[in-house]
Image (cartoon, rainbow, N blue to C red):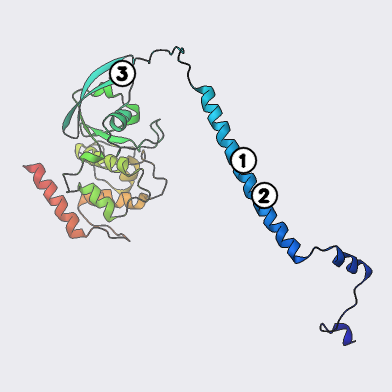
Amino acid sequence: MQDDFDETKERDLTEDEEALVKEMPALTDVGQARRTFLGQTITGGMGLFALMLFEKEQGLAAVSPSPDAVFAPAVIPENTITTTLKVNGAAKMLELDSRVVLLDALRETLELTGTKKGCEVGQCGACTVLVDGRRVLSCLTLAATLEGHEVTTIEGLARGEQLHPMQAAFIKYDGFQCGYCTPGQICSAVGLLEEARRGDVSHVTEDVTGTTTRLTDDEIRERMSGNICRCGAYPGIVAAVREVQTGKETARTWCFVEPEELARVRKEWQDDETV
C-alpha cells in the first residue's frame, strides 16, 4: 500500500501516455515556434497599422474639396442688437442676437464662466445671478431686456481679495462639495438676505405684516429651495445663511475660516455700506 503512494518511485506509462509523450515537440521546437509566433504577430500588426493609415489618407483625399467646388456663403446672424449691460460695476457694450439669454452672454461673450450652465430650463438654480440686487435665473432671462440694469455675478461679489461675507460663510461651514452649484447658491443667498430686509414674505412666513423677515431655518430652506445641490450640502448652506443674517455662530463640524476672521469681514463690509 505504501509503494502505491511513493512519489519517488518510477511509474510505468500506459500506452496512451507513451503515445502522447512521443507526439509532444521538443523544447527547442517550442521555443522556435514561440519566436515565430511573436515575429508573425508583430509583422501583422505593423501591416494592419500601415493599412489603416493608408485608408485614412484615402478617405481624406476623397473628401477634399474640388477646386471648382462652390460653397454657400457664411450664415449672417439675424436679429442682431446692440445693448449695454452693467456687469459687476463695468459697462459692457454687446452685439448679440436678440434671442441670446443672459447666461450665454455672460459665459460665451464676456467669458464670466463662474455662472454655471445646468438644466437650462430654470429648475436647478445653478445659473442664478443678481439683477439690481434681485436674484434671477440667467438661463431664462433675455440679455436684451437688461439694458441699463446692474448685473452682479459670483465674480462681482468679492472686493478684490476681500470675500463677501456669504462667500466666507460658505467656506467656514463647508457649504459645498463638488462646487458646481455653489456660485448660484451664493448669489441666491445674497439675494435672499435683501428679500428679508425688504420684508418679502414666503410660503412659510408666519407674520406677513412685518417690515423685515426673521430668517428661521424653515424660511432659509424655503427661499433656497430653487437651488439644487446634488451633493447634499444643505445643512452647511443653511448654517452659512443663518450666520450671515444673524451674526451668530451656529454649530459646525468643519472650520476653514476662523470666527474672528468672518466677523472682521462682516464688520468691514457693513462699515463700507454705511459710508
As shown in the figure, which amino acid type bears the numbered disc 1?
Leu
- CA gap, disc 1 and disc 3: 53 Å
In percent of width and height, residue 160 lies at: 16, 45
Which is more toward the observer, 135 or 153?
153
| N-term-proximal mark, 2 vs 1 | 2
Q: Quadrant of the N terminus?
A: bottom right
Mark nearest the camera among 2 and 3 is: 2
In percent of width and height, residue 118 lies at: 39, 36
Q: Which residue is mark 1?
A: 48
- CA gap, disc 2 and disc 3: 64 Å
> Helix, strand, or loop for circle 1?
helix
Q: Quadrant of residue 52?
A: top right
Question: Which residue is rendered at x = 35% and y = 47% of the image?
Answer: 179
Q: Which residue is mark 2?
A: 40
Mark nearest the camera among 1 and 3 is: 1
Question: Which residue is rendered at x = 89% and y = 69% of the image?
Answer: 18
> Helix, strand, or loop for circle 3?
loop
As shown in the figure, which amino acid type bears the numbered disc 2?
Gln
Which is more toward the observer, 25 or 82?
25
- Farthest residue to the left: give it: 275
Question: Is disc 1 surrounded by few (<14), some (14 to 19) or many (20+) residues within 10 Å?
Answer: few
In percent of width and height, residue 238 lies at: 31, 49
Question: Which residue is rendered at x = 58% and y = 41% of the image?
Answer: 49
